[in-house]
Image: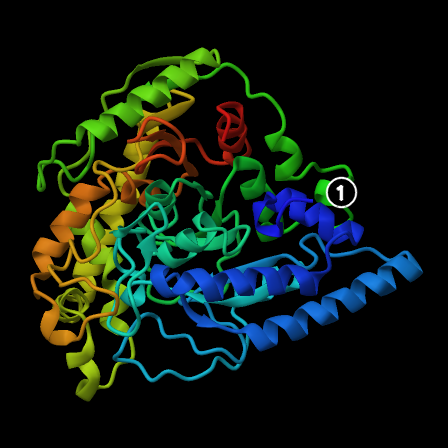
Protein backbone atom coordinates (compact mmCIF):
# COMPACT_ATOMS: atom_id res chain seq x y z
CA UNK A 1 0.00 0.00 0.00
CA UNK A 2 1.20 3.52 -0.81
CA UNK A 3 1.90 5.93 2.02
CA UNK A 4 -1.43 7.04 3.43
CA UNK A 5 -0.96 10.65 2.28
CA UNK A 6 -0.37 9.48 -1.30
CA UNK A 7 -3.85 7.97 -1.49
CA UNK A 8 -6.63 10.00 -3.02
CA UNK A 9 -9.44 10.94 -0.67
CA UNK A 10 -11.68 8.34 -2.31
CA UNK A 11 -8.99 5.66 -1.92
CA UNK A 12 -8.45 6.59 1.72
CA UNK A 13 -12.21 6.53 2.30
CA UNK A 14 -12.31 2.98 0.91
CA UNK A 15 -9.31 1.86 2.98
CA UNK A 16 -10.87 3.21 6.17
CA UNK A 17 -14.22 1.56 5.46
CA UNK A 18 -12.63 -1.79 4.67
CA UNK A 19 -10.46 -1.69 7.79
CA UNK A 20 -7.24 -1.79 5.77
CA UNK A 21 -6.33 1.50 7.48
CA UNK A 22 -7.53 2.41 10.96
CA UNK A 23 -8.77 5.88 11.75
CA UNK A 24 -6.08 6.20 14.42
CA UNK A 25 -3.34 5.26 11.94
CA UNK A 26 -4.65 7.76 9.40
CA UNK A 27 -4.91 10.57 11.94
CA UNK A 28 -1.47 9.81 13.36
CA UNK A 29 0.10 9.72 9.90
CA UNK A 30 -1.28 13.12 8.92
CA UNK A 31 -0.46 14.63 12.32
CA UNK A 32 3.15 13.52 11.83
CA UNK A 33 3.18 15.24 8.43
CA UNK A 34 1.76 18.42 9.95
CA UNK A 35 4.48 18.38 12.62
CA UNK A 36 7.16 18.06 9.93
CA UNK A 37 5.76 20.41 7.26
CA UNK A 38 3.67 23.08 8.96
CA UNK A 39 6.57 25.07 10.48
CA UNK A 40 7.63 26.25 7.01
CA UNK A 41 4.13 26.37 5.47
CA UNK A 42 2.00 28.09 8.12
CA UNK A 43 -1.07 26.18 6.97
CA UNK A 44 -2.34 25.44 10.50
CA UNK A 45 -2.92 27.97 13.27
CA UNK A 46 -3.99 25.30 15.77
CA UNK A 47 -3.31 21.55 15.75
CA UNK A 48 -5.60 19.47 17.98
CA UNK A 49 -3.55 16.28 18.02
CA UNK A 50 -4.73 14.80 21.32
CA UNK A 51 -8.40 15.34 20.58
CA UNK A 52 -7.95 14.01 17.06
CA UNK A 53 -6.41 10.77 18.31
CA UNK A 54 -9.19 10.34 20.87
CA UNK A 55 -11.82 10.90 18.18
CA UNK A 56 -10.00 8.49 15.86
CA UNK A 57 -9.98 5.79 18.55
CA UNK A 58 -13.72 6.29 18.98
CA UNK A 59 -14.13 6.01 15.21
CA UNK A 60 -12.25 2.71 15.26
CA UNK A 61 -14.68 1.51 17.94
CA UNK A 62 -17.57 2.37 15.65
CA UNK A 63 -15.90 0.39 12.86
CA UNK A 64 -15.49 -2.63 15.15
CA UNK A 65 -19.19 -2.52 16.12
CA UNK A 66 -20.16 -2.12 12.47
CA UNK A 67 -18.12 -5.20 11.54
CA UNK A 68 -19.66 -7.19 14.40
CA UNK A 69 -23.28 -6.03 14.07
CA UNK A 70 -23.55 -5.23 10.37
CA UNK A 71 -24.52 -1.62 11.01
CA UNK A 72 -23.56 1.03 8.51
CA UNK A 73 -20.72 3.54 8.68
CA UNK A 74 -21.03 7.28 8.07
CA UNK A 75 -20.05 8.51 4.62
CA UNK A 76 -16.66 9.94 5.67
CA UNK A 77 -15.85 7.45 8.42
CA UNK A 78 -12.44 8.26 9.92
CA UNK A 79 -11.43 10.81 7.26
CA UNK A 80 -9.02 13.48 8.57
CA UNK A 81 -9.91 17.08 7.75
CA UNK A 82 -9.09 20.59 8.91
CA UNK A 83 -11.41 23.56 9.36
CA UNK A 84 -10.45 27.11 8.47
CA UNK A 85 -10.22 29.31 11.54
CA UNK A 86 -13.49 31.09 10.83
CA UNK A 87 -15.40 27.91 11.71
CA UNK A 88 -16.36 27.07 15.30
CA UNK A 89 -15.19 23.66 16.49
CA UNK A 90 -16.27 22.81 20.04
CA UNK A 91 -13.45 23.20 22.55
CA UNK A 92 -11.09 24.88 20.08
CA UNK A 93 -10.30 28.60 19.84
CA UNK A 94 -11.71 30.39 16.80
CA UNK A 95 -9.37 33.33 16.14
CA UNK A 96 -11.02 34.68 12.96
CA UNK A 97 -7.43 35.59 12.11
CA UNK A 98 -7.64 38.70 14.30
CA UNK A 99 -5.52 40.04 17.13
CA UNK A 100 -8.39 42.36 18.06
CA UNK A 101 -10.63 39.55 19.37
CA UNK A 102 -10.45 37.64 22.62
CA UNK A 103 -9.47 34.10 21.76
CA UNK A 104 -11.80 31.77 23.63
CA UNK A 105 -12.65 28.14 22.86
CA UNK A 106 -15.96 27.67 21.05
CA UNK A 107 -18.68 26.18 23.21
CA UNK A 108 -20.34 24.30 20.34
CA UNK A 109 -19.61 23.10 16.85
CA UNK A 110 -20.70 25.48 14.12
CA UNK A 111 -23.03 24.19 11.40
CA UNK A 112 -20.19 23.10 9.09
CA UNK A 113 -18.23 21.25 11.77
CA UNK A 114 -21.39 19.59 13.06
CA UNK A 115 -22.34 18.43 9.56
CA UNK A 116 -18.97 16.92 8.77
CA UNK A 117 -18.49 15.38 12.21
CA UNK A 118 -21.86 13.65 11.78
CA UNK A 119 -20.46 12.32 8.49
CA UNK A 120 -17.57 10.74 10.42
CA UNK A 121 -14.61 13.10 9.91
CA UNK A 122 -11.75 13.57 12.37
CA UNK A 123 -10.71 17.21 12.82
CA UNK A 124 -6.94 17.73 13.02
CA UNK A 125 -7.09 21.45 13.73
CA UNK A 126 -7.75 24.94 12.40
CA UNK A 127 -6.12 26.50 9.34
CA UNK A 128 -4.74 29.96 8.65
CA UNK A 129 -7.06 32.70 7.38
CA UNK A 130 -6.87 36.45 6.78
CA UNK A 131 -8.55 38.65 9.36
CA UNK A 132 -12.30 37.91 9.22
CA UNK A 133 -11.75 36.16 5.87
CA UNK A 134 -11.66 39.48 4.04
CA UNK A 135 -8.73 39.06 1.66
CA UNK A 136 -7.32 37.03 -1.23
CA UNK A 137 -4.22 36.14 0.84
CA UNK A 138 -3.97 34.36 4.21
CA UNK A 139 -1.77 36.60 6.30
CA UNK A 140 -2.61 38.18 9.66
CA UNK A 141 -1.09 39.49 12.88
CA UNK A 142 -1.46 36.41 15.04
CA UNK A 143 0.38 33.61 13.26
CA UNK A 144 2.86 33.00 10.42
CA UNK A 145 1.47 33.54 6.92
CA UNK A 146 0.17 30.61 4.93
CA UNK A 147 2.65 29.79 2.18
CA UNK A 148 2.32 28.04 -1.14
CA UNK A 149 3.63 24.45 -1.03
CA UNK A 150 4.84 24.79 -4.62
CA UNK A 151 6.88 27.93 -3.85
CA UNK A 152 7.03 28.89 -0.16
CA UNK A 153 7.95 32.50 -0.96
CA UNK A 154 4.50 32.81 -2.59
CA UNK A 155 1.07 33.12 -1.01
CA UNK A 156 -1.38 30.23 -0.92
CA UNK A 157 -4.24 32.65 -1.59
CA UNK A 158 -7.24 33.41 0.58
CA UNK A 159 -9.33 33.33 2.46
CA UNK A 160 -9.18 29.51 2.56
CA UNK A 161 -5.43 29.70 2.02
CA UNK A 162 -4.37 27.62 5.01
CA UNK A 163 -6.77 24.85 4.02
CA UNK A 164 -5.60 24.93 0.40
CA UNK A 165 -1.96 24.77 1.48
CA UNK A 166 -2.76 21.83 3.75
CA UNK A 167 -4.45 19.89 0.94
CA UNK A 168 -1.76 20.71 -1.64
CA UNK A 169 1.00 19.65 0.80
CA UNK A 170 -0.92 16.44 1.61
CA UNK A 171 -1.37 17.35 5.26
CA UNK A 172 -5.06 16.41 4.85
CA UNK A 173 -6.75 14.51 2.00
CA UNK A 174 -9.26 17.31 1.33
CA UNK A 175 -10.80 20.23 3.21
CA UNK A 176 -13.91 22.38 3.30
CA UNK A 177 -13.49 26.05 2.47
CA UNK A 178 -15.84 28.99 2.41
CA UNK A 179 -16.23 31.34 -0.54
CA UNK A 180 -17.77 34.82 -0.35
CA UNK A 181 -15.81 36.48 -3.15
CA UNK A 182 -13.51 33.75 -4.43
CA UNK A 183 -12.19 32.31 -1.17
CA UNK A 184 -12.30 28.68 -2.37
CA UNK A 185 -11.44 29.26 -6.03
CA UNK A 186 -8.56 31.72 -5.48
CA UNK A 187 -6.48 29.47 -3.16
CA UNK A 188 -7.37 26.43 -5.27
CA UNK A 189 -5.93 28.16 -8.32
CA UNK A 190 -2.86 29.36 -6.40
CA UNK A 191 -2.13 25.89 -4.99
CA UNK A 192 -2.97 23.74 -8.02
CA UNK A 193 -6.20 22.24 -6.65
CA UNK A 194 -9.76 21.70 -7.76
CA UNK A 195 -11.95 24.16 -5.87
CA UNK A 196 -15.74 24.13 -6.20
CA UNK A 197 -18.00 26.99 -5.15
CA UNK A 198 -21.53 25.54 -4.99
CA UNK A 199 -24.53 27.61 -5.94
CA UNK A 200 -26.33 29.63 -3.32
CA UNK A 201 -28.51 27.47 -1.09
CA UNK A 202 -27.12 24.04 -2.00
CA UNK A 203 -25.01 23.66 1.15
CA UNK A 204 -26.82 24.77 4.33
CA UNK A 205 -25.26 27.99 5.59
CA UNK A 206 -26.20 27.56 9.25
CA UNK A 207 -26.22 30.72 11.30
CA UNK A 208 -24.71 33.51 9.24
CA UNK A 209 -24.21 37.08 10.34
CA UNK A 210 -22.65 39.97 8.50
CA UNK A 211 -23.47 38.67 5.01
CA UNK A 212 -26.52 40.68 3.94
CA UNK A 213 -26.08 39.82 0.25
CA UNK A 214 -25.87 36.05 0.85
CA UNK A 215 -22.44 35.82 -0.74
CA UNK A 216 -20.77 33.12 1.37
CA UNK A 217 -21.07 29.41 0.61
CA UNK A 218 -19.10 26.34 1.70
CA UNK A 219 -17.35 24.18 -0.87
CA UNK A 220 -14.60 21.54 -1.23
CA UNK A 221 -10.88 21.97 -1.83
CA UNK A 222 -9.39 18.76 -3.23
CA UNK A 223 -6.69 17.34 -5.44
CA UNK A 224 -9.21 15.95 -7.94
CA UNK A 225 -12.79 16.36 -9.05
CA UNK A 226 -13.76 12.97 -7.63
CA UNK A 227 -12.32 13.85 -4.22
CA UNK A 228 -14.21 17.16 -4.33
CA UNK A 229 -17.39 15.29 -5.22
CA UNK A 230 -16.98 12.98 -2.24
CA UNK A 231 -16.71 15.92 0.16
CA UNK A 232 -19.64 17.68 -1.51
CA UNK A 233 -21.75 14.57 -0.89
CA UNK A 234 -21.14 15.03 2.84
CA UNK A 235 -21.91 18.77 2.71
CA UNK A 236 -25.24 18.51 0.86
CA UNK A 237 -28.24 17.08 2.74
CA UNK A 238 -29.53 13.84 1.26
CA UNK A 239 -33.25 13.22 0.80
CA UNK A 240 -34.47 10.91 3.55
CA UNK A 241 -34.32 7.25 2.53
CA UNK A 242 -31.52 7.58 -0.04
CA UNK A 243 -28.06 6.15 0.40
CA UNK A 244 -25.98 8.58 -1.62
CA UNK A 245 -22.74 7.28 -3.08
CA UNK A 246 -23.28 3.85 -1.54
CA UNK A 247 -26.45 3.24 -3.54
CA UNK A 248 -30.09 4.25 -3.40
CA UNK A 249 -32.45 5.98 -5.79
CA UNK A 250 -30.77 9.39 -5.82
CA UNK A 251 -27.17 9.34 -7.09
CA UNK A 252 -24.62 11.36 -5.16
CA UNK A 253 -22.09 13.77 -6.64
CA UNK A 254 -19.35 11.14 -6.58
CA UNK A 255 -21.46 8.91 -8.81
CA UNK A 256 -22.48 11.78 -11.06
CA UNK A 257 -18.90 13.02 -11.44
CA UNK A 258 -17.98 9.71 -13.10
CA UNK A 259 -20.41 10.35 -15.99
CA UNK A 260 -19.29 11.94 -19.25
CA UNK A 261 -20.79 15.40 -19.72
CA UNK A 262 -22.83 16.21 -22.80
CA UNK A 263 -21.27 18.34 -25.55
CA UNK A 264 -21.27 21.91 -24.24
CA UNK A 265 -21.27 25.41 -25.70
CA UNK A 266 -18.74 27.39 -23.69
CA UNK A 267 -18.34 31.15 -23.79
CA UNK A 268 -14.80 32.45 -23.29
CA UNK A 269 -14.49 35.86 -21.66
CA UNK A 270 -11.90 38.18 -20.14
CA UNK A 271 -14.51 40.78 -19.19
CA UNK A 272 -14.65 41.77 -15.52
CA UNK A 273 -16.90 44.09 -13.50
CA UNK A 274 -13.72 45.56 -11.94
CA UNK A 275 -12.03 46.64 -15.16
CA UNK A 276 -13.57 50.13 -15.33
CA UNK A 277 -12.38 51.19 -11.87
CA UNK A 278 -9.22 49.04 -11.79
CA UNK A 279 -7.99 48.55 -15.37
CA UNK A 280 -5.81 45.46 -15.47
CA UNK A 281 -3.88 43.40 -18.01
CA UNK A 282 -3.77 39.63 -17.40
CA UNK A 283 -0.26 38.25 -17.15
CA UNK A 284 0.89 36.09 -20.08
CA UNK A 285 0.84 33.04 -17.80
CA UNK A 286 -2.86 33.62 -17.07
CA UNK A 287 -3.59 33.79 -20.78
CA UNK A 288 -1.53 30.63 -21.27
CA UNK A 289 -3.76 28.92 -18.73
CA UNK A 290 -6.86 30.11 -20.56
CA UNK A 291 -5.47 28.83 -23.89
CA UNK A 292 -4.66 25.48 -22.27
CA UNK A 293 -8.21 25.28 -20.95
CA UNK A 294 -9.65 26.01 -24.39
CA UNK A 295 -7.47 23.31 -25.97
CA UNK A 296 -8.49 20.72 -23.39
CA UNK A 297 -12.18 21.55 -23.68
CA UNK A 298 -12.16 21.46 -27.48
CA UNK A 299 -10.20 18.20 -27.48
CA UNK A 300 -12.94 16.78 -25.24
CA UNK A 301 -15.52 17.71 -27.88
CA UNK A 302 -16.90 20.96 -26.50
CA UNK A 303 -17.46 24.11 -28.57
CA UNK A 304 -15.89 27.38 -27.43
CA UNK A 305 -16.58 30.89 -28.67
CA UNK A 306 -15.96 34.44 -27.51
CA UNK A 307 -18.41 35.77 -24.93
CA UNK A 308 -18.68 39.53 -24.58
CA UNK A 309 -20.22 40.24 -21.18
CA UNK A 310 -21.27 43.77 -20.26
CA UNK A 311 -21.15 44.49 -16.54
CA UNK A 312 -22.70 47.55 -14.89
CA UNK A 313 -19.90 49.89 -13.80
CA UNK A 314 -21.65 50.56 -10.48
CA UNK A 315 -20.71 47.05 -9.38
CA UNK A 316 -17.40 47.73 -7.54
CA UNK A 317 -18.89 50.20 -5.07
CA UNK A 318 -22.00 48.10 -4.45
CA UNK A 319 -20.04 44.88 -3.94
CA UNK A 320 -17.54 46.52 -1.60
CA UNK A 321 -20.39 47.99 0.45
CA UNK A 322 -22.04 44.58 0.86
CA UNK A 323 -18.76 42.69 1.33
CA UNK A 324 -17.55 44.90 4.16
CA UNK A 325 -20.88 45.35 5.97
CA UNK A 326 -20.10 42.49 8.34
CA UNK A 327 -16.82 43.90 9.60
CA UNK A 328 -18.59 47.12 10.43
CA UNK A 329 -20.91 45.29 12.82
CA UNK A 330 -18.27 42.95 14.31
CA UNK A 331 -18.11 43.08 18.09
CA UNK A 332 -14.72 44.63 18.81
CA UNK A 333 -14.10 46.68 21.91
CA UNK A 334 -12.75 50.17 21.11
CA UNK A 335 -9.52 49.61 23.03
CA UNK A 336 -8.59 46.72 20.69
CA UNK A 337 -9.44 48.32 17.34
CA UNK A 338 -5.83 49.45 16.92
CA UNK A 339 -4.91 45.75 16.67
CA UNK A 340 -6.87 45.36 13.43
CA UNK A 341 -4.97 45.26 10.16
CA UNK A 342 -5.03 48.53 8.17
CA UNK A 343 -7.41 47.07 5.60
CA UNK A 344 -9.88 45.78 8.18
CA UNK A 345 -9.73 48.98 10.22
CA UNK A 346 -10.29 51.16 7.15
CA UNK A 347 -13.23 49.16 5.82
CA UNK A 348 -14.75 48.87 9.31
CA UNK A 349 -14.70 52.64 9.70
CA UNK A 350 -16.27 53.19 6.29
CA UNK A 351 -18.93 50.56 6.91
CA UNK A 352 -19.88 52.20 10.20
CA UNK A 353 -20.18 55.57 8.49
CA UNK A 354 -22.61 54.31 5.83
CA UNK A 355 -26.31 54.69 6.40
CA UNK A 356 -28.66 51.68 6.35
CA UNK A 357 -30.28 53.24 3.30
CA UNK A 358 -26.96 53.18 1.44
CA UNK A 359 -26.49 49.49 2.23
CA UNK A 360 -30.03 48.69 1.11
CA UNK A 361 -29.46 50.59 -2.12
CA UNK A 362 -26.33 48.52 -2.80
CA UNK A 363 -28.14 45.27 -2.05
CA UNK A 364 -30.92 46.25 -4.44
CA UNK A 365 -28.41 47.01 -7.16
CA UNK A 366 -26.66 43.66 -6.66
CA UNK A 367 -29.98 41.82 -7.06
CA UNK A 368 -30.49 43.56 -10.41
CA UNK A 369 -26.86 42.86 -11.35
CA UNK A 370 -27.52 39.19 -10.64
CA UNK A 371 -30.52 39.06 -12.98
CA UNK A 372 -28.76 40.99 -15.77
CA UNK A 373 -25.55 38.94 -15.61
CA UNK A 374 -27.28 35.55 -15.47
CA UNK A 375 -29.35 36.56 -18.50
CA UNK A 376 -26.14 37.22 -20.46
CA UNK A 377 -24.46 33.99 -19.31
CA UNK A 378 -27.54 32.01 -20.43
CA UNK A 379 -26.42 32.24 -24.08
CA UNK A 380 -23.88 29.51 -23.27
CA UNK A 381 -23.88 26.32 -21.21
CA UNK A 382 -20.78 27.42 -19.28
CA UNK A 383 -18.62 30.54 -19.11
CA UNK A 384 -14.82 30.15 -19.16
CA UNK A 385 -12.15 32.59 -17.95
CA UNK A 386 -8.80 32.43 -16.17
CA UNK A 387 -9.10 31.67 -12.48
CA UNK A 388 -6.60 34.45 -11.66
CA UNK A 389 -5.08 37.30 -13.66
CA UNK A 390 -1.61 36.80 -12.14
CA UNK A 391 0.61 34.02 -10.86
CA UNK A 392 0.51 33.44 -7.08
CA UNK A 393 1.81 36.61 -5.42
CA UNK A 394 4.78 36.80 -3.04
CA UNK A 395 3.97 36.66 0.67
CA UNK A 396 3.63 40.25 1.92
CA UNK A 397 3.03 41.63 -1.60
CA UNK A 398 -0.51 42.86 -0.99
CA UNK A 399 0.22 44.59 2.32
CA UNK A 400 3.72 45.87 1.63
CA UNK A 401 4.86 43.97 4.73
CA UNK A 402 8.24 42.44 5.26
CA UNK A 403 8.04 38.68 4.99
CA UNK A 404 10.26 36.26 6.84
CA UNK A 405 9.73 33.10 8.79
CA UNK A 406 7.34 34.65 11.28
CA UNK A 407 4.34 36.92 11.27
CA UNK A 408 4.80 40.65 11.42
CA UNK A 409 3.78 43.13 14.11
CA UNK A 410 1.63 46.18 13.45
CA UNK A 411 4.54 48.47 12.64
CA UNK A 412 5.57 46.37 9.66
CA UNK A 413 2.27 46.66 7.77
CA UNK A 414 2.40 49.41 5.18
CA UNK A 415 -1.12 50.59 5.96
CA UNK A 416 -2.32 51.33 2.40
CA UNK A 417 -5.75 49.70 2.61
CA UNK A 418 -6.94 51.01 -0.77
CA UNK A 419 -3.75 49.90 -2.52
CA UNK A 420 -4.09 46.47 -0.91
CA UNK A 421 -7.70 46.16 -2.07
CA UNK A 422 -6.89 47.28 -5.59
CA UNK A 423 -4.14 44.67 -5.85
CA UNK A 424 -6.57 41.97 -4.77
CA UNK A 425 -9.17 43.02 -7.34
CA UNK A 426 -6.56 43.03 -10.09
CA UNK A 427 -5.26 39.63 -8.95
CA UNK A 428 -8.70 37.98 -8.85
CA UNK A 429 -11.00 40.07 -11.07
CA UNK A 430 -13.30 37.22 -12.13
CA UNK A 431 -14.46 35.75 -8.84
CA UNK A 432 -16.71 38.00 -6.73
CA UNK A 433 -19.45 38.51 -9.35
CA UNK A 434 -20.10 34.75 -9.27
CA UNK A 435 -20.98 35.03 -5.57
CA UNK A 436 -23.30 37.96 -6.27
CA UNK A 437 -25.03 35.88 -8.95
CA UNK A 438 -25.21 32.86 -6.61
CA UNK A 439 -23.94 30.55 -9.36
CA UNK A 440 -21.76 27.43 -9.09
CA UNK A 441 -18.17 27.73 -10.33
CA UNK A 442 -15.09 25.54 -10.35
CA UNK A 443 -11.35 26.25 -10.51
CA UNK A 444 -9.32 23.63 -12.43
CA UNK A 445 -5.47 23.61 -12.43
CA UNK A 446 -4.83 23.21 -16.15
CA UNK A 447 -1.42 24.92 -16.47
CA UNK A 448 1.97 25.11 -14.72
CA UNK A 449 4.63 27.69 -15.49
CA UNK A 450 7.28 24.97 -15.62
CA UNK A 451 5.42 23.17 -18.40
CA UNK A 452 4.43 20.03 -16.50
CA UNK A 453 2.04 19.34 -13.66
CA UNK A 454 3.76 20.06 -10.36
CA UNK A 455 6.52 22.06 -12.09
CA UNK A 456 6.75 25.78 -11.39
CA UNK A 457 3.67 27.71 -10.33
CA UNK A 458 0.09 26.52 -10.94
CA UNK A 459 -2.47 28.51 -12.89
CA UNK A 460 -6.06 27.56 -13.45
CA UNK A 461 -9.24 28.23 -15.33
CA UNK A 462 -12.64 28.99 -13.90
CA UNK A 463 -15.85 27.55 -15.31
CA UNK A 464 -19.15 29.12 -14.27
CA UNK A 465 -22.39 27.20 -14.70
CA UNK A 466 -26.10 27.85 -14.24
CA UNK A 467 -27.86 27.06 -10.99
CA UNK A 468 -27.80 23.36 -10.21
CA UNK A 469 -24.77 22.59 -12.42
CA UNK A 470 -22.38 21.43 -9.68
CA UNK A 471 -22.38 17.86 -11.01
CA UNK A 472 -21.77 19.09 -14.55
CA UNK A 473 -18.80 21.19 -13.45
CA UNK A 474 -17.31 18.20 -11.63
CA UNK A 475 -17.90 16.04 -14.71
CA UNK A 476 -16.05 18.48 -16.94
CA UNK A 477 -13.12 18.74 -14.50
CA UNK A 478 -12.90 14.94 -14.34
CA UNK A 479 -13.19 14.67 -18.12
CA UNK A 480 -10.20 17.01 -18.49
CA UNK A 481 -8.17 14.72 -16.25
CA UNK A 482 -8.38 16.57 -12.95
- Residue 347, relative to residue 225: is it above or below? below
- Residue 252, relative to residue 155: is it above or below? above
Where residue 29 sits, quadrant-wise, is bottom right
- Residue 352 drawn at (x, y percent): 16, 71
On the rendered structure, is 356 left or right of 181?
Answer: left
On the rendered structure, is 64 left or right of 352?
Answer: right
Residue that label 1 marks? 246
On the rendered structure, is 145 left or right of 24?
Answer: left
Residue sitting at x 35%, y 61%: 40
Q: Quadrant of the N terminus?
A: top right
Where residue 314 sits, quadrant-wise, is top left
Residue sitting at x 61%, y 38%: 253
Residue sitting at x 55%, y 21%: 261
> Could you tell me if residue 387 is visible in this image?
yes
Q: SS of the residue at dot 1?
A: helix
- Residue 213 drawn at (x, y percent): 32, 54
Rate crowding at label 1 as few (under 14), some (14 to 19) or many (20 or more) other CA atoms within 10 Å: few
> Could you tell me if residue 315 is visible in this image?
no
Q: Observer-nearest residue: 200 or 61?
A: 61
Amino acid sequence: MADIHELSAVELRDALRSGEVSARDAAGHFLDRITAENPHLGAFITVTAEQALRDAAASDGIHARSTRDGTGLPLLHGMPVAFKDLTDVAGVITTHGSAALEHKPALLDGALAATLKSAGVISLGKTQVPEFGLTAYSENRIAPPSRNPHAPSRSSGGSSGGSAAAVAARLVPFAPGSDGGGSVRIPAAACGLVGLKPGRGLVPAGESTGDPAGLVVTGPLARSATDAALLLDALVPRPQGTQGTQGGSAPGYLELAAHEPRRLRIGVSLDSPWQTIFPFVPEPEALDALAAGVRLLEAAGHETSEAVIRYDNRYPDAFTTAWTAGVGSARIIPQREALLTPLTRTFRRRAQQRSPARLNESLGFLRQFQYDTIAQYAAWDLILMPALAQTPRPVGWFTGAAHGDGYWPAAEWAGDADGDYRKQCEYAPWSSMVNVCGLPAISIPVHWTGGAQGSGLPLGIQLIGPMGSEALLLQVAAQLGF
